[in-house]
Amino acid sequence: MEMKNIKTTFYDNGGVIKASKLHENKVSKYEIKKLVDENVIERISKGYYKLTDDDISDIKLISILLPGAIICFDSALFLYGYSDRTPVKWHLAVDKNISKSKVNMKYPYIKPYYIDKSILNIGVEEILVEDVRMKIYSREKLICDCLKYESKMDVEIFNKAIISYIKDPKKNIPKLMEIAKKRKVEKKVYDKIGVWL
C-alpha cells in the first residue's frame, strides 16, 4: 500500500487503527513491522497503531482504546478543581474482568483501578475533556471514594478534596448520602463533612 493511502486509512479511522483493520486494507504483518521500524507508525497498545507524527491527545487515545473507562481519583479531582496537582498518569476505573493486555499500553500513561462490575457504574456522569466525551465519576461518588480510601491517599490531596467539595456550589448532598449508603461510608460523611453543612 502506498504511503499516501496508509495515511488516509489512519485519518479515516480517527488516527488509531487495529492491526486487523490494516490487514483488511492489504497491509501485511511484515509491512506493519517495516512501518514501525521506519518510524512511520508506532504501536500504542497490543494490536493498535497510530502515525508517529500524528499528535493525538491522551484523552482521545483513551476514548478509543478504553471506551468503557471512567475518569476517577486524582484525574477526576483535578478536572473538578478539587486538586491543583496535575496527575502524571490518567486515573481510570475499568471493569475488573478487562483483559490486562488491553490496559497495558505504552502510551498514554494510565493508572487503572480494577472495579467489580456491580459497583463500576455507580455515580457515572459524562463531561467534555478537550472536546472528547468521557465518563467520569460524579463529585459525590468521587468524595465517597476519597472517604472510603482515605488511608491510601495523600493527606494534603484528601483534605483539599473535602474542603473543595464543601465549598462547591454544585455539590448535591442528597446524592452524596445516597452514594455513601451504597459505598458504606455514611458515618465518614457525617464525621468529615456533616459538621460543615
Image: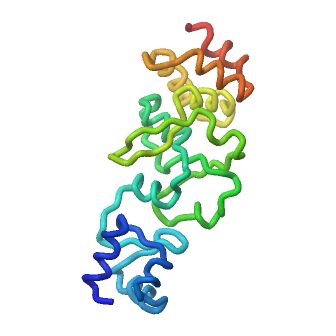
Q: Nearer the viewer, residue 70 or 26?
A: 26
Q: How many marks?
A: 0
The quadrant in which the C terminus is found is: top right
Residue at x 65%, y 63% (from the top left corner): 100
| Quarter-of-image position of residue 21 | bottom left
Task: Give the residue drawn at x 66%, y 37%.
Answer: 152
Residue drawn at the location 52% of the way across and 43% of the way down: 71
Above or below for 27 versus 75:
below
Outermost residue toward the bottom? 30
Q: Quadrant of residue 15?
A: bottom left
Most extreme residue toward the left is 4
Quarter of the N terminus within the rendering = bottom left
- Tell which of 89 and 8 is nearer to you: 8
Q: Is residue 157 above or below residue 47?
A: above
Query: Residue at point 61% right, 7% down?
Result: 195
The residue furthest front is 24
Q: How is the image coloured?
A: rainbow
Q: Residue 166: give x, y in percent of width and height.
A: 51, 16
179 over 46 or under it: above or below: above
Q: Position of residue 30 (x, y in %)?
A: 46, 92
- Left or right of residue 196: residue 83: left
Residue 113 lies, in percent from the top left, at 63, 48
Task: Write down the quadrant of residue 86 in the picture.
Answer: top left
Residue 22 position, x and y percent, is 43, 81
- Asked if residue 189 lies left or right of residue 37, the reply is right
